[in-house]
Image (cartoon, rainbow, N blue to C red):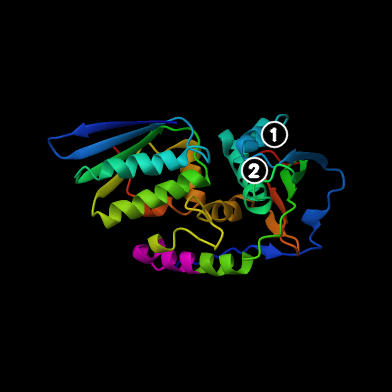
Amino acid sequence: MKNMIIRKLIVDENNELFDAQGMKYIEFKSDFSRIREYSARILEHCPKQFLEDGLLEQQLSEIIKNGIKHGNRNDVSKKLKVWYDLRGRARFIVEDEGGGFKRLHEWNAFYQRRQEALYNNDFELFLKLAAYRGPESDEFDGGNSLIAALEFWNGGMIYNEAKNKVGVVRWFSNGSG
Amino acid sequence: MEIQFFENDGDKSLVVKVSGDCDLYNAHHLFNDVTGKMDGGYAEVYVDFSGTPYLDSSGVGALIRILQYAKSKKIDLKFRGIGGTVRKVLRLSNILSIITEDRQ
């Protein structure tokens, strides 16, 4: 019998993923048109084996996009702060100046229903639940970045209490240490 | 991103060839262009991603909306050429298991 594993977004202000000691720091204007450029700049000197043919840049861009679009509402006067450490693993802390991901627990409930539909082979329901829409979502938001992020950041994805700061880490079996 | 359409009047099928990155800056074109063309009365539509090296969550969102649209129109939608990073992103998003792949 297969097991159903449902990951969750976790809030833990004191989690070690928020310890920025020894990490590099960079900050950006919340310019939506430059999101992929920001990711590329952070990963300029990243070990090649961590890049996974663009997957790391894609996942980092999603976190930066969430901060700029949903957190700072594309307000270029607001900063996006990024701490990063690419020694032995890929670790990031991204903080925006917005009001925080207030519907985090609602999103967890949505994701659980979606995964249960998939587990039960209920593809009709799964397709209906394929996209998450909060009151401030636009037609291109679907919560898909968080679904993939929970799988990709295999060392954790943690939010602070204000939910405007996220810490993530990905370990690599072929390049850590 | 470039989107090309190839029609086959014989079996009323449509092939959509997507080339280049499909990301937050252009994914809306994928949805608008493909669903706009789907209204042409096709029984089968094939979306070919063999020329797409990069797909992000906006692209995944567009793809889900295309799936929902095809279902509402009772169009048989299949995908070709899903490999590399695109495949990894669809797997991470739990979408790979619900799409039909046409392995030519």
**Residue under pointer 1:** A43
**Residue A93 placement, left or right of B6:** right
Instruction: Locate the C terminus of chain B by quadrant.
Output: top left
**Magenta residue check for A123:** yes
Residue A1 in magenta stretch: no
Tag 1: residue type?
A: Leu
Q: Is residue A80 left or right of residue B101?
A: right
Tell me where the magenta segment starts and ends, as one range.
A113-126
Please name whichever residue, A143 or A1, is drawn nearer the observer in this view of the structure: A143
Which quadrant would the N terminus of chain B be assigned to in this image? Answer: top left
Return the x and y of residue A158 as percentages of the image width and height. 71, 59
Of residues A88 and B60, the one drawn nearer to the viewer in this rendering: B60
Give the image location of residue B2, x and y in percent.
40, 29
Residue A155 against residue B59 in the figure, above or below: below
Q: Is residue B60 left or right of residue B73?
A: right
Residue annotated with mark 2: A60
Q: Quadrant of residue A127?
A: bottom left
Check if mark 2's residue and mark 1's residue have beta carbons within 8 Å.
yes
**Which is more toward the observer, B25 or B51?**
B25
Residue type, mark 2 in image: Leu
